[in-house]
């Protein structure tokens, strides 16, 4: 036996320790008087201490903290990653009925256009999905944009037809989700969505009213905060809401106020809150590069933010988690994003009306050389080719990060590092603090 290369031992102020394994996700508490003993077992699992404490040895093995001498954890993770990338049992479909948006967010990465998915393209989409369902056990659908609620009649029509199609083909459908700015998503729309099988929606609030409205306003300059908050009060009993707060230098210090507002309006217990890093993923939003954090700065900002929340008795801290051997669905063969014009993309963040940026289309048109190259960039991208990624002790919870960011930077000889690389130990401490103080 030998210790896992993905173990992390974090010592707390009172001498207690936490031991976390990035590969299995196992997290255990070690009492201070046991810590030295556990360390010895991990370093020398074959010595006499092991024989004297078989139960502890079994627990360490079960949690993945100890592995067999023959185990190559990185090779096993790579093999699992390649296998997951080729699995064809689930078709993950992102549909953008339009790239138009009623907002004028200054950090938006989508090239907005007034083009809407016409009836001919809608029917071609249904036919395309029908042809792809052979051998498929499950269809997952996410509606995206632009702002998808601007085309809600299209969503209702196409989703109803997809529901009928999967029922006829005996294919499981779900979860059905949507990424929306939330401005038009009132209770009436949420009810209609629920009747179609929608379960989840992601909505963004970037700060208290003044801050949010300076970043996420309508094209006429009108603020959007109050309407989104009113809609949240109406829909959280119908749909699971993931509330996203996009962070950069301009709003980090005010982000905590979002959570306070949700708490005051009795919305907080009904939603999950996620803090995300504003990034410049395209030329569209390159103008805000100066206010974006790098990974290390963002990691430190998260620590400060969660510490403030805990001090106020709000116990929401993100958990580290593995990505089932693949960071992003864009790396799998059955992950597809469809533009309003019927062009196909591997990643929703690269959606465009430019056919030469796509990987093909839903009409059966033979792909161009540019489209083949676009597809190959995802198919060939492999973080296990980078020495720094292979040697990283948080590889299972990062897996090279966003392939879209990494593949377009030819100078990088590594993936895109996760904030966990810089704040894992502090986040584990905060998670433990939440648990103990909440109890």
Image (spheres, rainbow, N blue to C red):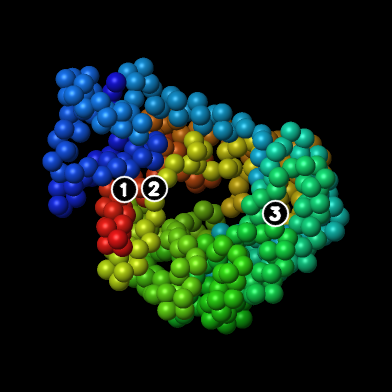
Query: What kind of element bears circle 3?
Result: strand
Q: CA distance from mark 2 to mark 3?
A: 29 Å
Q: CA distance from mark 1 to mark 2?
A: 8 Å
Q: Nearer the viewer, residue 366 or 310?
A: 310
Residue 135: horizontal and vertical position, in percent?
A: 74, 33
Q: Is residue 70 left or right of residue 335?
A: left
Residue 354: horizontal and vertical position, in percent?
A: 70, 51
Is residue 413 visible in the rendered image? The answer is: yes
Mark 2 or 3, nearer chain start:
3
Quadrant of the rendered image containing residue 70? top left
* Mark 1 in CB contact with mark 3 (< 8 angstroms): no
Name the residue rendered at 27%, 48% in the picture. Answer: 425
Q: Nearer the viewer, residue 54 or 162?
A: 54
Camera-near label (2 vs 3) is 2
Name the residue rendered at 77%, 63% in the picture. Answer: 156
Q: Which residue is mark 2?
A: 320
Q: Which residue is mark 3?
A: 95
Quadrant of the rendered image containing residue 10? top left
Q: Which residue is mark 1?
A: 424
Mark 1 or 2, nearer chain start:
2
């Amino acid at each position: 036996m030998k210790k896992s290369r993905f173990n992390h031992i974090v010592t707390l102020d009172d001498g207690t320790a936490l031991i976390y394994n990035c590969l299995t996700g196992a997290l255990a508490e070690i009492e201070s008087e046991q810590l030295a003993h556990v360390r010895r077992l991990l370093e020398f699992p074959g010595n006499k201490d092991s024989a004297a404490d078989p139960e502890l040895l079994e627990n360490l093995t079960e949690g993945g903290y100890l592995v067999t001498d023959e185990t190559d954890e990185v090779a096993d993770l790579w093999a699992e990653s390649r296998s997951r990338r080729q699995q064809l049992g689930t078709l993950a479909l992102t549909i953008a009925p339009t790239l138009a948006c009623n907002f004028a967010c200054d950090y938006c990465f989508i090239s907005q256009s007034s083009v809407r998915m016409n009836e001919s393209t809608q029917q071609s989409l249904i036919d395309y999905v029908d042809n792809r369902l052979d051998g498929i056990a499950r269809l997952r659908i996410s509606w995206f944009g632009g702002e998808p609620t601007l085309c809600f009649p299209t969503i209702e029509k196409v989703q109803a037809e997809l529901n009928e199609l999967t029922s006829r083909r005996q294919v499981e459908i779900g979860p059905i989700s949507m990424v929306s700015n939330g401005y038009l998503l009132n209770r009436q729309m949420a009810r209609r969505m629920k009747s179609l099988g929608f379960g989840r929606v992601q909505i963004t609030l970037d700060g208290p009213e003044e801050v949010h409205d300076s970043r996420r306003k309508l094209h006429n300059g009108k603020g959007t905060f109050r309407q989104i908050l009113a809609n949240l009060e109406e829909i959280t009993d119908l749909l699971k809401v993931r509330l996203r707060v996009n962070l950069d230098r301009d709003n980090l210090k005010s982000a905590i106020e979002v959570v306070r507002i949700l708490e005051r309006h009795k919305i907080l217990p009904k939603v999950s809150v996620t803090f995300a890093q504003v990034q410049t993923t395209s030329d569209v939003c390159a103008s805000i590069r100066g206010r974006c954090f790098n990974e290390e700065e963002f990691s430190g900002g998260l620590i400060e933010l969660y510490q403030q929340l805990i001090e106020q008795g709000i116990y929401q801290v993100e958990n580290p988690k593995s990505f089932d051997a693949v960071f992003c669905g864009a790396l799998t063969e059955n992950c597809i994003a469809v533009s309003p014009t019927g062009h196909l993309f591997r990643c929703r963040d690269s959606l465009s009306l430019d056919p030469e940026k796509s990987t093909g289309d839903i009409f059966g048109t033979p792909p161009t050389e540019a489209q083949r190259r676009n597809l190959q960039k995802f198919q060939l991208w492999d973080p296990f080719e980078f020495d720094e990624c292979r040697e990283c002790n948080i590889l299972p919870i990062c897996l090279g990060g966003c392939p879209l960011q990494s593949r377009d930077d030819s100078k990088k000889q590594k993936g895109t590092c996760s904030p966990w690389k810089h704040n894992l130990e502090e986040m584990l401490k905060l998670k433990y603090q939440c648990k103990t103080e909440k109890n």
